């Protein structure tokens, strides 16, 4: 299942495309942002259970912004979980 998310304008990334296989993160593509960081985070959570990925990424700040690309990815994963897996 694929889920697309538009991050907050307080971060550099422009879109997050999440592919789930059940409750497993199969693939994440982040458009925009710092390529090394976004590709690294995407690769690190590949194959991880969605709840573990959310727990590890949620709340990570980026300077004064109050959020970050990893934090926005956690929010996207929460939405994907709710919409695609029917969980809250």
Image (spheres, grey):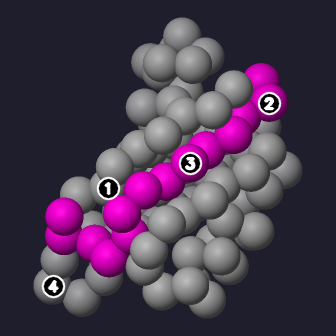
Return the residue at label 3: 17
Identify the element where label 1 is drawn: loop
Residue most toward the right? Answer: 47
Q: Which residues are magenta?
A: 9-22
Q: Residue at x 34, y 49 (%)?
A: 6
Report the number of numbered marks.
4
Return the residue at label 4: 64
Overall secondary structure of the magenta stretch?
Answer: strand
Return the residue at label 2: 21
Q: CA distance from mark 3 to mark 2?
A: 13 Å
Return the residue at label 1: 7
Identify the element where label 3 is drawn: strand
Q: Earlier in the sequence, mark 4 or mark 1?
A: 1
Q: Nearer the viewer, residue 45 or 55?
A: 45
**Mark toward the viewer: 4 or 1:** 1
**Mark toward the viewer: 3 or 2:** 3
- Compared with 67, 54 (above or below) is above
Identify the element where label 4 is drawn: loop
Q: CA distance from mark 2 to mark 4?
A: 35 Å
Q: Nearer the viewer, residue 8 or 82?
A: 8
Q: Are marks 2 and 4 in contact (CB under 8 Å)?
A: no
Q: Earlier in the sequence, mark 3 or mark 1?
A: 1
Q: Earlier in the sequence, mark 2 or mark 1?
A: 1
Q: Residue at x 24, y 88 (%)?
A: 63
- Compared with 56, 50 (above or below) is above
Task: Please state, as top left, top right, bottom left or bottom right, where the C terminus lies in the image.
Answer: top left
């Amino acid at each position: 299942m694929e889920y697309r998310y538009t991050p907050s304008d307080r971060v550099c990334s422009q879109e997050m495309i999440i592919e789930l296989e059940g409750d497993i993160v199969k693939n994440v593509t982040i458009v925009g942002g710092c390529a090394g960081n976004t590709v690294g985070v995407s690769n690190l959570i590949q194959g991880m259970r969605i709840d573990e990925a959310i727990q590890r990424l949620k709340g990570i700040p980026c300077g004064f912004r109050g959020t970050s690309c990893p934090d926005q990815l956690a929010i996207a994963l929460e939405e994907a979980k709710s919409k695609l897996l029917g969980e809250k």
